[in-house]
Image: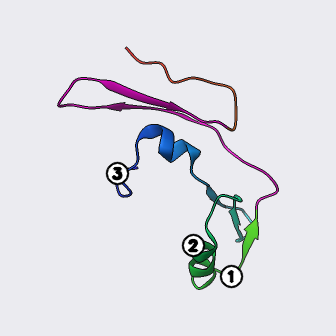
Amino acid sequence: MTIFGMDPQEALDDGRIFWDNDGALLAESGIPSQTRSALIDYVHQVLSAPGPFGAGQIIQIDHQSGFLIGGSDPRKDGLALGW
């Protein structure tokens, strides 16, 4: 999130990459082809994930304004709730 300047929702909406126990890298369909190509240079195998995986909710604190900024993963049911 921080490195790419994303807000919580943008980070959760983005494609995911997962390292499985067999040493292959599984990439969701949202991962750009340039990223997939670059990853192939570093690992043995990059496979397409059979579907979305994982789920999360994020609450970010904006320390300047005091606001809580939330995001919820579109892959699953859930919500981001903070107080």
Q: Earlier in the sequence, mark 2 or mark 1?
A: 2
Residue 24 falls in image quadrant = bottom right
Mark-to-mark CA distance, 2 and 1: 15 Å
Measure the alpha-carbon separation of dots 3 and 1: 28 Å
Q: Determine the secondary structure under disc 3.
A: loop
Q: Label 2 sits on what residue type?
A: Thr
Q: Mark 2 or mark 1, which is nearer to you?
A: 2
As drawn, 13 above or below 26: above
Q: Does residue 20 belong to the magenta stretch?
A: no
> Marks 3 and 2: in contact by CB < 8 Å?
no
User: Which label was assigned to residue 35?
Assistant: 2
Q: Which residue is mark 3?
A: 2
Disc 1 target residue: 44
Local packing at callout 1 (Cα closer than 10 Å; few below 14, some 14-19, many 20+) is few
Q: Nearer the viewer, residue 24 or 2?
A: 2
Please, what is the dominant secondary structure of the magenta stretch? loop
Please state if 48 lies on the left or on the right of 41 as rendered: right
Three-letter residue code for mark 1 = His
| Screen quadrant of the C terminus | top left
**Residue 62 in magenta?**
yes
N-term-proximal mark, 3 vs 1:
3
Residue 60 lies, in percent from the top left, at 36, 33
The structure residue drawn at horizontal position 35% and vertical position 57%, both measured from the top left corner, is 3
Q: Which span is picked out in magenta?
A: 49-74
Outermost residue toward the left in this view = 64
